[in-house]
Amino acid sequence: MVKIFPVTDLPAAASLSPHPTLPAFTVEQCKKHGCDAHAVIVREGMVVARTSLWWNRTPSVSGERAGIAGHFAAVDETAAREVLDAAATELKRNGCTTCVGPMDGNTWRRYRLLTERGAEPAFFLEPDNPDAWPIFFQAANFTPLATYFSAMNDDLTVEDPRVARATERLMSEGMRLRPLNAEDFVGELRRIYAVSRTAFEKNFLYSPIEEAEFLAQYEPIRAQVVPGLVILAEQDEQPVGFVFSIPDLAQAKRGQSVDTVILKTVAVMPGRRSAGLGNVLVSRCQQAARALGFRRVIHALMHESNNSLNLSGRYAKPFRRYVLYARKL
């Protein structure tokens, strides 16, 4: 049985018992993420598949009006197909011409599915999913919209010769690189947010979020941040770029020594004055990781665009792939 709950009736959705194999979820996440509805499939009194829906304030995709399906989970292919079909019908009814998923409202939150796992264990903060979920989306007539990869650099002695020239030019123009000031963590995040908001606004599927939500996303990992692995670039006393990296604490949970850094985000303000800064920041991050005793750097969750390949391809080799899907309505 399909049930679709508008955002005004989420308490009724909360009253349903989830199947014990579904990942943990509360409808409070729907409210927090501003979804427009929540769809479930119920069997024998239990939720066996779910997805939240967004059709307001969503990005366009190649001229299409996109609806979004996120918070996805399903116990089997039949349930997944039923809930995704219901999602497609509801999004079309609300004027959407394509459905994108899985995405929890926007790309600042959890989105895409891991499709090629490889031999490397999951790293800290990496999204994971059952291997069957990509098959579920394909069975519901979704096709790949965008592909992503994570790559490993296990030789931190390698340096791009072009970085030295770019660094010299940027420094001669007044660029300053410095580590994060941990005593002003919130202030530093606000500077990072300001760069992100502008640097990413032309990115595929970009939607803005409020500063408060951005800050809240980073608060849970505040204690794990190593200041030397977060580097800010400033010019004329204004932030113009950053690289945000963090140790792979998943290694510690497996009882291993932590010898790997995750390069999570690199962003640079647009404009000719910042040309080459992305490469410089990636290089400085890897140098800092090596100086702190780390052996490897993961370039995490990059869109398979020319820019990402240029930043990562000089150092790292892909070991994991992910897909974001879409379905024409």
Image (cartoon, rainbow, N blue to C red):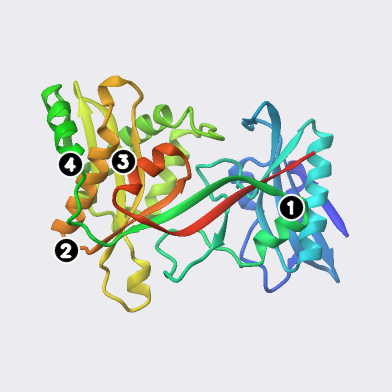
Q: Secondary structure at mark 4?
A: helix
Mark 4 or mark 1: which is in front?
4
* Image quadrant where residue 44 sits: bottom right
Numbered badge on residue 11:
1
Q: Is residue 259 left or right of residue 329?
A: left
Numbered badge on residue 112:
none
Q: Is residue 141 at least partly visible in the picture? A: yes
Identified at 62% across, 66% down, the residue is 23
Neighbours of disc 2 within 10 Å: few (<14), some (14-19), many (20+): few
Name the amino acid, label 1: Pro
Q: CA distance from mark 3 to mark 4?
A: 35 Å
Name the amino acid, label 2: Gly
Q: CA distance from mark 2 to mark 3?
A: 27 Å
Q: CA distance from mark 3 to mark 1?
A: 34 Å
Q: Which residue is mark 2?
A: 293
Q: Secondary structure at mark 3?
A: helix
Q: Is residue 277 left or right of residue 72?
A: left
Name the amino acid, label 3: Val
Q: Is residue 103 above or below residue 280?
A: below
Neighbours of disc 1 within 10 Å: few (<14), some (14-19), many (20+): few
Is label 4 in contact with label 2 (beta carbons under 8 Å)?
A: no
Numbered badge on residue 161:
4
